[in-house]
Image (cartoon, grey):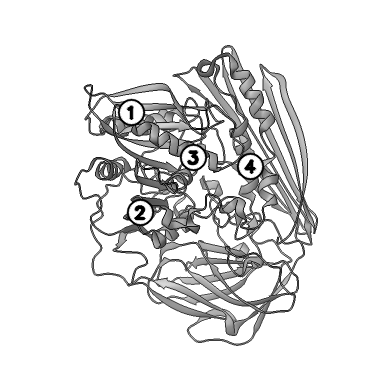
Amino acid sequence: MTPTLDRRTFIGALALTFTPGVAAAVAASPQRYSVKTIEPMWIPVSAGLNLAGRLWLPDAPAGTRFPVVLEYIPYRTFDRYRPLDDYWGAALAERGIAFARVDIRGSGNSEGLLLDEYLETEQQDGADIIGWLAEQDWCNGAVGMRGISWGGFSTLQVAARQPPALKAIMPMCATDMRFRNDAHYVGGLPGLTNLKWAAGFELVMSSPPDPAVVGRRWEEMWRERLEATPSIAARWLSHSANDDYWRQGSVGLNPETITCPTYIVDGWADSYAESAERLMRNLRVPHKAIIGPWGHNYPQFGRPGPGLNWIDEEERWWKHWLAGEQNGAMDGPAFRFHLNYQTPSHTGMKDIPGHWAAEQSWPSPDIRERILHLAPKRLSEAPARGRLSYKADKVVGLTAPEWIPYAVAELPRDQRQDDERSLLFDLPLTENQDVVGVPRLHLRVRSNRPVAAVAARLCEVDPEGRSWLVGYGILNLGFRGGFTTPPERLKPGRSYDVAIDLAPIAYRFKAGHTLRLAISESLWPLVWPSPEAPTLEFDLAGCRLALPIRPVPATEPVFPIAEKDIQFPQSNPRLDIQEGPDGRVHVSGAWAASSSKVEATSTELSGSGPDMLLDFNPSDPNSCRWEVKQSSRYRREGWDCEIRVSIEMTATSTHFTINESLTAFKDNAPFYSREKTNHIPRHYS
């Protein structure tokens, strides 16, 4: 997924190669080959389509053969992603590794239609691309696959098809379980990110091909894309359980289908770290992993830092598995990670204090659970008795409204406001506690309504009383049996034993501070509220928190990758949160409109959003309203196309409603327009 197609892309990195820092970084890399670029590169696939891409090759004598690495995404390599692709293409090719970037069918200049995420046709096309690359006379027959976000998803999904020439992969910030751990549903509840990504993805599906590449048929192709673009938010919302729709492409359901060596890359500030931890546990092929302090980002551009000189690590990986070089790529611990001493909110996306640590294997036999029982206002070593109740009549979640924060303004704020509206359980610390892994909360809970959720936040309270969010978890109680079994509504008044996995962390809770567990019924606007405001009752005899405690080793293994941050300009959205005296909450957010020029194509790229307007009054659970708008524009002499998307979501106690509009302009004149309204039954949320 990606929140915008404008100046940030999903990592805020389109601006990277317009800055002296990036150009200098490329120039400073080992100069083994000059690089030649081939574009457009047309690749035929078995569906009878030609997919468009670009190719970076080491400039070497005829007959020299190299391995090639593929990145396969729908984000327009000829213009919007061009700077980022140029960066990785040059960096790899100058090291003797060819790099191919191909737009998925129906995106960029590729033929066909893009109708949804992660379709089987997309995966088959990917396998076809790998076979085609392996047969080229400049290729040694070995192909690798890499990518971040969608690129990481497609890497895992194509690898599961086991194309013979695919010898190794490097998925970054990617999911192995589409329903459980992606932008659409958070803990089984509809997420705000679902709506924001829907607006961005409609722009991906409906953007025009470039007439300079595809010729006169560009306008016909564009209209076909516009007419075929579905109301994607409604489609996603209509699949409210982990059905076959989401299971397709969820490689975590059958991890044994991944048969090639895998390097898992992620960051603790990224919501996909959950999948990274699960893949580490479940893969049975040669694999290694690194999780840094950063968010949804490449390690090379890590924010929060420290970032890493990642291109050197990629070179070792690819040359070992694709060219047979014995360079120690698999030596040392299987899992390296940054142990954070503070949260990203402490540093405002700057470098986080901590150190690089490692485990020889994962799960680590050295990590032991510490069981803390829930007692009134405290966490206790001994079991407690009694009951505590919580009524969902207040808004909790305003201090951390974003599923993945991309900027300082989107980071979690001081949690005290939300803490005051939650059940709190505190443990003052007399010594440091290094928590590494997945904290798990066990609850015995009952609800007076058939639909309810539980949200848990793990915080560190400093001596000044500030509460810092370390990790959280949320569970729609309809999925109390897990996400691989059909959900069921609750029986009001009946007690259930449930387990909630919080996000995996590597964090040092410090002596003199307080470890805090905060429990509420929901987190808004992270997720949509329950249709009726439930009251939850917790039986403390069945409530405990299991923390994975890592003992401090005498020494840590030497970290082999140099730290290196490439600085780039950072923008911030406007985020305004207002609470009225009646409890009503209004949230508005907007990214400033942007504009940049792709010199190679003389194309001006501009756009706005995602802009959001969110309203909710907790006294009326069905007063919630979300609206998201986003636009993008492509313009140069003789070519001017703009697309605008608007999506609104509301609900009653029985149905969701999605109002969606898609409008396109050619040369400032209306070219296409449609509006759709979809009513979707509410089953479990």
| Mark sitting earlier along the chain (4/1) | 1
Q: Can residue 548 be spotted in the picture?
A: yes
Report the residue marked by disc 4: 198
Of the residues tagged 4 and 1, which is closer to the observer? Answer: 1
Please name the residue that numbered disc 3 is placed on: 124
Q: Secondary structure at mark 2?
A: strand
Q: Nearer the viewer, residue 488 or 386?
A: 488
Relative to 234, 9 lies left or right: left
- C-alpha separation, residue under disc 3 versus residue under disc 4: 24 Å
Mark 1 crowdedness (10 Å alpha carbons): few <14, some 14-19, many ≥20: few
In the image, is residue 59 above or below residue 329?
above
Residue at 75% across / 70% down in the picture?
Answer: 449
* Marks 1/3: CA–CA distance: 19 Å
Type of amino acid under label 2: Ile
Task: Give the residue number, with chain letter if any, for mark 2.
Answer: 290
Q: Which of these two is toward me, 221 or 294?
A: 221
The residue to which callout 1 is attached is 136
